[in-house]
């Protein structure tokens, strides 16, 4: 019986996560289409220029001319934005589309957490409560945290956060599967 | 309960497969309609490419126009001054050019702006997703699939909320079904490995490379004695890419480049990725690639396929044809040969005017969207200046005295 319940809960959570991930993908596609239709690129180009200026000033102020030290000191986010020119590796490049992608990914993560919480409130679903109910130790040694703090509103909110955060790995998996095996690029 | 859920999920999956098939069939028909208006699309796409290329060319011509009018001695002097200046300010020529473009360099960082998003593919993507969801909702209503009530019991039964949720999930599952169908068919992977194995076998017997000095008239030089005559010496140089796979054996490349079973080749020579030069056609004879201006041009092709836009035919966007950009050695040796031609035939050093890419002559993608034009022009300029030095003059003199260089009328 416990196995059945776990299976149902896991399926339900996966289903909601899948719903959320696809809904956000639909929203992103709509936004991309809107941007392309209105040729609304200037904001992102300006953002890229600003990022380039920031990173350039970091490099100039702290690291002098040394090629390796640039690589060492710029932070992870900067490294995600920067690539090197294929023909002349000494030239650093920032692609405005990468800046856009990173910025959107950040917004999407926040929105997914928010929507996750909203869905959990609407469904009145508390994952931690369910776990505490179906846990084999619940009758003999009820887990304190699950039986007290997480049984109420906080549990629902945290469940939303969990669902919201789970959309990102699911999205990455979906994109990877589709890219890997797609007939057309 | 689990059986009930499993049964419903199975139905959901079947519906997703059905929707995937419906959408796929629809795509087939829309592509068919698109193909039937193919010629118009191709012409429109070529026109668009040419106008883009012209725009780029005009920008670069502005940068080079002042330098292009200078004599070799002035260029030499200018290069010396530039070298001294660049030592002082520690900036390279590329950076200087980039600073002059509308998107400025921030010290060492170049910004590549977004100038367009592929609106057609975005529209298709959005339409596919919305259509799938629409179909999903219809099927959910018709077959009474209620996923919310299935998992979370009564409150959502038969509500609009539940129908929309179930339809949305069914419709979007088709995205994964498409990926899985592709995975099980596995066509893309098989084809790629076949192509690679064929080219790997061919490349095993690649001959040793020839250098700039080895020019002796190229292939079929005797047979061309009375054909493909030029009226005067060439006044322009057109550069191409071969559009072929890089590991191909040189014999296969030559076979591919003989046009209409004639004795002449499409290009005067090919520069291979390792810097080797294969001379195909006599320089005093016209090659066959450009029908309109073949009498007045010399053609050089960089071996490889450097076109990376997905909408072009024979594009290298997946890297199936090898590297998507020419190698540095290839560019250097190509630049050296073009500089030599400029000296031999007094062709002015005017990028995009007297030395121009194929796409400025004919509606084509050649030499590809990934071709580094500016870098090639830098090498040409460098070697042109080098050939002005007394130490390098004998090379030009040697070539001037070789056969198969100048056409008879001009000698």
Image (cartoon, coloured by chain):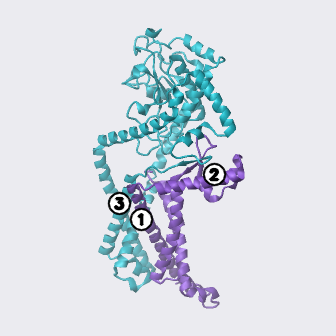
- Sort mark 2 into few (<14), some (14-19) or many (20+) by Cα contacts within 10 Å: many
SS for tag 1?
helix
Image quarter where the N terminus of chain B lies is: bottom left
Residue located at (47% from left, 14% from top): B221
* Image location (x, y in percent) of residue A81: 58, 54
- Chain A: drawing colour: purple
On the same chain: label 3 and label 2? no
Instruction: Give the CA separation, mark 3 to mark 2.
Output: 41 Å
Left or right for B35, reference A10 = left
From the image, tell me which residue sits under label 2. A56
Q: Is residue B38 above or below residue A37?
A: above
Chain of the residue where label 1 is placed in the rendered structure: A
SS for tag 2?
helix
From the image, tell me which residue sits under label 1. A26
Q: Which chain is displayed in cyan in the rendered image?
A: B
Q: Is tag 1's residue or tag 2's residue first in the polypeptide sequence?
A: 1
Nearer the observer, B244 or A88:
A88
* Image location (x, y in percent) of residue B397: 59, 13
* Label 3–label 2 contact, CB within 8 A: no
* Label 1–label 2 contact, CB within 8 A: no
Outermost bottom residue: A140
From the image, tell me which residue sits under label 3. B127
Instruction: Give the CA separation, mark 3 to mark 1.
Output: 10 Å
SS for tag 3?
helix
Chain of the residue where label 3 is placed in the rendered structure: B
Q: Nearer the viewer, mark 1 or mark 2?
A: 2
Q: Is residue B244 above or below residue B297?
A: below
Left or right for B88, reference B18 = right
């Amino acid at each position: 019986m416990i196995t059945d319940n776990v299976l149902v809960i896991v399926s339900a959570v996966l289903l909601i996560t899948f719903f959320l991930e696809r809904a956000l993908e639909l929203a992103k596609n709509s936004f991309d289409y809107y941007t392309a239709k209105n040729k609304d690129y200037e904001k992102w180009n300006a953002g890229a220029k600003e990022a380039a200026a920031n990173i350039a000033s970091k490099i100039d102020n702290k690291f002098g001319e040394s090629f390796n030290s640039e690589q060492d000191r710029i932070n992870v986010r900067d490294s995600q934005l920067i690539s090197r020119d294929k023909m002349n590796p000494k030239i650093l490049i920032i692609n405005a589309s990468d800046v856009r992608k990173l910025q959107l990914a950040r917004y999407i993560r926040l929105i997914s957490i928010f929507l996750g919480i909203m869905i959990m409130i609407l469904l009145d679903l508390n994952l931690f409560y369910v776990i505490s109910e179906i846990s084999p130790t619940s009758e003999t040694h009820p887990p304190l945290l699950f039986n007290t703090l997480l049984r109420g509103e906080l549990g629902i909110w945290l469940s939303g956060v969990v669902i919201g955060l789970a959309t990102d790995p699911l999205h990455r998996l979906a994109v990877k599967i589709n890219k890997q095996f797609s007939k057309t690029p | 309960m689990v059986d009930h859920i499993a049964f419903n999920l199975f139905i959901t999956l079947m519906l997703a497969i059905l929707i995937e098939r419906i959408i796929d069939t629809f795509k087939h028909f829309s592509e068919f309609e698109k193909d039937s208006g193919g010629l118009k699309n191709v012409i429109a796409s070529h026109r668009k490419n040419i106008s883009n290329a012209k725009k780029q060319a005009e920008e670069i011509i502005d940068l080079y126009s002042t330098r292009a009018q200078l004599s070799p001695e002035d260029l030499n002097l200018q290069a010396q001054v530039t070298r001294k200046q660049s030592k002082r300010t520690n900036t390279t020529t590329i950076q200087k050019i980039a600073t002059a473009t509308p998107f400025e360099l921030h010290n060492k960082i170049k910004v590549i702006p977004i100038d367009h998003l592929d609106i057609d593919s975005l529209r298709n993507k959005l339409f596919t997703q919305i259509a799938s969801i629409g179909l999903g909702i219809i099927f959910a209503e018709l077959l009474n699939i209620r996923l919310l009530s299935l998992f979370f019991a009564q409150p959502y039964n038969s509500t609009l909320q539940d129908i929309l949720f179930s339809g949305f999930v069914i419709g979007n599952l088709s995205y994964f079904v498409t990926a899985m169908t592709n995975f099980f068919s596995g066509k893309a992977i098989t084809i790629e490995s076949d192509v690679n194995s064929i080219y790997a076998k061919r490349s095993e017997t690649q001959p040793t490379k020839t250098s700039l000095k080895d020019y002796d008239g190229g292939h079929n030089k005797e047979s061309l004695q009375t054909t493909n005559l030029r009226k005067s010496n060439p006044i322009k140089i057109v550069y191409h890419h071969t559009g072929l796979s890089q590991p191909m054996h040189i014999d296969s490349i030559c076979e591919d480049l003989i046009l209409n079973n004639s004795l002449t080749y499409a290009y005067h020579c090919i520069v291979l990725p390792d810097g080797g030069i294969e001379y195909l056609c006599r320089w005093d004879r016209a090659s066959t690639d450009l029908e309109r201006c073949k009498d007045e041009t010399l053609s050089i092709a960089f071996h490889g396929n450097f076109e990376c836009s997905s909408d072009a035919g024979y594009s290298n966007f997946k890297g199936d044809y090898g590297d998507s950009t020419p190698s540095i050695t290839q560019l250097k040796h190509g630049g050296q040969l073009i500089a030599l031609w400029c000296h031999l035939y007094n062709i002015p050093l005017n990028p995009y005017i007297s030395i121009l890419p194929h796409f400025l002559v004919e509606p084509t993608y050649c030499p590809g969207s990934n071709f580094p034009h500016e870098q090639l022009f830098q090498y040409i300029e460098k070697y042109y200046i080098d050939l002005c030095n007394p130490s390098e003059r004998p090379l030009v003199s040697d070539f001037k005295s070789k056969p198969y260089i100048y056409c008879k009328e001009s000698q």
